[in-house]
Amino acid sequence: MEKSNVCVNCQNMLAKVSAKLKLNETELDILTTPRRTFTFSFPIIMDNGKTKIFTGYRIQFNNARGPAKGGIRFHQDVDLEDVKVLAFLMSLKCAVADIPFGGAKGGVAVDTKSLSSGELERVSREYIREAYRFIGPNTDIPAPDVNTDSKIMAWMLDEYEKIIGRHAPAVITGKPIQLGGSLVRDISTSLGGIFVLKEVTKELKMKTENAKAVVQGFGNAGMNAARILHENKWKVIAVSDSKTAIYNENGLNIQKVIEHKKNNKSLKGFKDAKEITNMELLELECDVLVPAAMQDQITKNNANNIKAKIILELANSPITPEADLMLEKKGIKVVPDILANSGGVIVSYFEWVQNSMNYYWTREEVLKKLEEHMISATKEIQRICREENCSMRDSSYILAVNKILEAERLRGVLR
Ligand code: GLU
């Protein structure tokens, strides 16, 4: 047999739905083999005068439904296999969200906390000096992800435009407003997740006032989710960052937590709360648990200890496939990442549309469109759940797989 570039982890993720849909080998291979995989290394002169080599990745997983789309992650653990899975999930996510994009993801293996601002800028610009050859407004459109933000998107856009010699704001999303960013993009991942959560709690006939919420991660997604939940009168009893977790069974004052994090760069030392570990946080009794940090947080080792009623996956892939089955058996409602966190890429799409027509929407317009998109995707998934008697994860995979295969068929790739 010839060796193939298929993503085995992606196949494992699709195994259950693939059997249910009776996908043949070719269909499964099309869905789980990345179309283009780029790995590159680039030297950066560090502030101490020494040269350090960094490794970067970009994977365009599938582009049957439109240009590849997905963020760039800066994290010390980033490797090719991770980026493949994340790019695969982006293909499914764009299909579920019903936006005309395929899926991509990029990354650099770097610990951003060890870099000065100048070093971070050089890494960001150098990434684009490599990637400019294969990204573009109609080919592949990057965006922020873990440890990358609007400031980094601005440097990347600037570098791209310098190389090609003209403006091209639609090449990257998640930009600052002054450079063509969209209103609401900064909070869209969390806000989109909360729109979905509202639909899910409605379906479960669950009262949300003073219901207990736990949030893992205090980056863009986690911090905004905690804030919006608090504003919506949920009782946020615990939050965490990469260093610690804080817990108060009577509810945390999230505004004060945010101020503390801003002033101290850490949640450590926050008064009015008990410090616990990130693992203890996941196992707290609560109504909704929001993993909003990294992948593989709930595994077969701790799945049986999870006591949440609902898990809203704001992070990508925080639950392993084995753990997912265990949670389903326990009757825990899991709202899968490709629906729960799709608000980010949905407003990225709105940003790209606004850049392409060079006409910009008001905050209210973007909010309304985001809410409509989230609610219609959620309802569609709930409908499939009822018809197929399956979990929301299976239902969202069924929806995405059918849409991608249909696009491949229409292109003549599949007969
Ligand atoms: N990185 C985000 C995600 O995983 C956003 C991607 C985008 O806006 O293209 O969904």
Image (cartoon, helix red, strand yellow):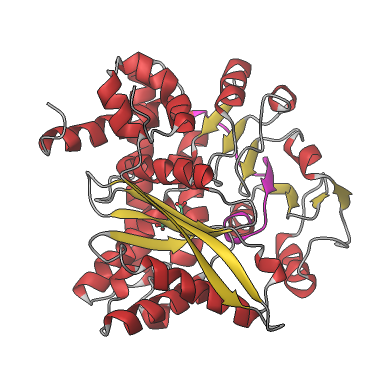
Span shown in magenta: 204-222
Q: In the figure, residue 119 lies in which quadrant?
A: bottom right
Q: Is residue 67 left or right of residue 244?
A: left
User: Which quadrant: the N terminus?
Assistant: top left
Q: Residue at x 52, y 54 (%)?
A: 190
Which one is in front, 46 or 284?
46
Q: Quadrant of ligand 1?
A: bottom left
Front-most of residues 243 and 99? 243
Residue 183 in sight: no
- Membership of 313 in magenta stretch: no
Rendered view: 264 above or below 403: below
Is residue 329 found left or right of 38 in the rendered image? Answer: right
Q: How many marks?
A: 0
Nearer to the camera, 175 or 158: 158
Across and down, in percent, residue 21 comes to 31, 17
116 in relation to 57, above or below: below
